[in-house]
Amino acid sequence: MSFGQDKVKKEIEALRIADKIKIDGYLDESIWEQAKVASDFTTFEPDPGEEPLYDTEVKMLYDDEAIYLGVFMKDEYPDSILKELTLRDDIGNTDFFAVSFDYYRSGLSGLEFGVTASGVQFDINWSDGPDNGWDAVWLSEARIGSDGWYVEMKIPFSAMRFADAEEQIWYVNFSRNIRRTREQSWWQEMDPADPNWFAQYGLTKGIKDIKTPTRLFFFPYLSYYVEHAPDGDDGSSSWARSINGGMDVKYGINDAFTLDLTLIPDFGQVVSDNQVLNLSPFEIQFAENRQFFTEGTDLFNKANIFYSRRIGGTPQLFWDVEDHLNDTDSILSNPATSQLINAAKVSGRNQQGLGIGVFNAVTSETKARIFDEESGEERDFVTDPLTNYNVLVFDQNLWTNASVAVINTNVTRNGSFYDANATGTEFRLPDKENNWVLSGSSVLSQRYFSDSTELGTRLEYSLDKISGKSNYGASFNRIGRDYNVNDLGINFRTNFTSYSAFYSWRTLEPVGKFNRLRFNLFSFYQRNNEPNRFADFAINWWSFALTKGFTAFGLNGRFEPVNTFDFFEPRVFGRYYEYPRNWRIGGFVSSDYRKTFAGDIEWGTRHFNEPGRYNTYFELRPRLRVSDQFFVRGSYSVFKQFNDVGWAEEWNDDIVFGIRDRVDRETTLRARYIFSPLMGVNLIGRYYWGTVKYDSFHSLTDDGGLGYTDYTGIDEYGVSLENNNFNAFTIDAQFTWWFAPGSSMTAAWKNNIFTSDPELQRNYFDNLSQVLQSDQLNSFSIRVLYFLDYNQLRKKA
């Protein structure tokens, strides 16, 4: 393998056409014969810098409307081409071809358009990381022939962002993946040791006299919901029906910036959250599944102070309603989420490398409804006021892979509720050779109450070597006691200072029986700020190996050689729990996913310097490709903690800790049946069972140990106050049909069951049977989304 420091950039010359091209996978129009060919690809994986197994030829045409790509990928065994059908943006177990453009030749960002051998589209907006939620409207067709396979693509200029110029000269590269050999090759040779990804690309030539089109798209939708839910403890239930309508709008303000607007949003078909039994002092962070908040939001992630799940999330005073009840009061309703009225975002990056993002959302006032049984009257209790959420970010590219950013988040609430503001900076400064990088961020958080203002700070800095086989670096992190960005961000731990260092090593080409080898060593030292004292020290390591038969395996471990101090578990400032010395080891094995049946096994164990205290973890993840259309993936995991020690209660001004056994079991089933690249069914079923059984209770002593307490954890009826048997059973099934470019119809069924009680079941199936007989919420919905392009509407007018 040999990579030159100054590789000559390849060029592909596009040919202007006057006649229409039919996108059908057959390159039978005569104009394709006149186009120049881009070929001579070079491998990237598994062995970089070599000649690929088969030739690939790419031709490029254009007119006033779009770029056209005609691709021939030679394969002398076309029957062996893997072509699993998937839903859009899921590559799956199949060959694929992709083209990537960097329209401003920034070397930092671009758009990728790809097609699998089964004809499935995927597209990615590479801006501040891969944005897989970004979806453009473009045409493609794949076809397997007697000598290989073919791809034909039409990418409208309205799906791109570029500046007005007499000739469009873009960075461009083409990639091909042969799945059965796991060979990936590129037209312009790529160096895996060079993190300057887009800067390595080749160039387009010959695209002249085109105008940037008006990028104005409308996505009106209509949805219908039917919901069946229990009414109360008497076993009765009721049906509810609703019809909703709204629209999303996407407008290209200029060649660089785009406005996205959602009017009367509808998130009823969003996949269920993975609820668990949470005994930690921190909230659970859930994934964002709402498309408006996943597409084009990478720019807003600077300084790590934006968490979109806050918008339309749990109302501020949702858990406080019971504290405001009189003896004769009962709760009629208490909405678990705030209603989003509308949301808008503007984002993009200009030719000078300045990225600008503006985000705004408004949620309506949320009220709990309370009934006074004595007077017969009802009243409202405001759990969340009318709230405005705003994010503003500026991100300036300096030189290749260098940038500096400023971001501000603001939450303004109506009435007597407090407001919040956070301002952060982030920088990344590599040297000219891109061997070393100095990076960091700083954040000031502010919360404005009626009688005071709360200020907090966070500082992070690191210096790392990032190129070559061996990398290493060190970092510093300090978070103040009053740092709080949780009104529009998420942060768990505060009031600490930590120092860390790492070393990593990797291979860049096959070695012996292995395609890849990696090793990482990481260590950190942490102190509590107030009071200033030692908190934690640990050494972590992990290793990874991929054989030439594409079996992956790894080992990992953690060692805490001294007693450490947890200042978060007691839930009281200044108090701590002294954690014993402990060590952990784990590993995994993953078989070759190209096979019809494959899977993963993961395990781990952790042992403490206390008699009988240890944890075990095991997970099995089988996967079966029944056919190219039908795929099933399951998992079963069990995490057991024996003689675990943790917070249980505050009682008589005492912090009560308990010694307990915890077991978390999770079973999931994912299945999909794909009828065609434009139609398929996706199913996700999940059953989570979490239990905790307390054996004894103790008072937390001032020195972090466990002492005597009168607390028994039993109520006056002999029922445990702390034991918990929590179950979450959810099913999410969706049928999706893309009946026209950019337009879709989705039918969804959701089933949710959540139970919690102190009675512990010992048998898995008995417990599951009891859960399935519990109250459940069922909903069915149909949603139709239609795509309208202003340019096409103007032509028809």
Image (cartoon, rainbow, N blue to C red):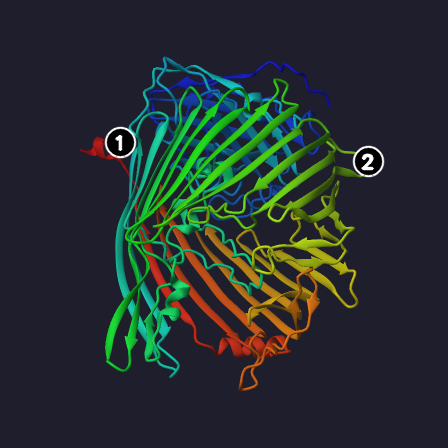
Q: What label sits on residue 584 in the rendered view? A: none
Image quarter of the N terminus: top right
Q: Position of residue 514 (x, y in %)?
A: 77, 39
On screen, 718 above or below 488? below
Q: Is residue 394 left or right of residue 670?
A: left
Q: What amino acid is found at the position of numbered circle 2 in the picture?
A: Gly
Image quarter of the C terminus: top left
Q: What label sits on residue 512 in the rendered view? A: 2
Q: Using the rendered view, name the quadrant where residue 155 is placed.
A: top left
Q: Is residue 598 visible?
A: no
Q: CA distance from mark 1 to mark 2?
A: 57 Å
Q: Position of residue 8 (x, y in %)?
A: 60, 13
Callout 2 environment at 10 Å: few (<14), some (14 to 19), or many (20+)? few
On screen, 53 above or below 638? above
For this rendering, which residue is in front, 441 or 249? 441
Q: Position of residue 43 (x, y in %)?
A: 66, 28
User: Which residue is under mark 1?
Assistant: 791
Residue at x 70%, y 63% (from the top left corner): 705
Helix, strand or loop at mark 2: loop
For this rendering, which residue is in front, 447 or 519? 447
Callout 1 environment at 10 Å: few (<14), some (14 to 19), or many (20+)? some
Q: Is residue 684 left or right of residue 585?
A: left
Residue at x 66%, y 28% (from the top left corner): 192
Residue at x 64%, y 57% (from the top left corner): 576
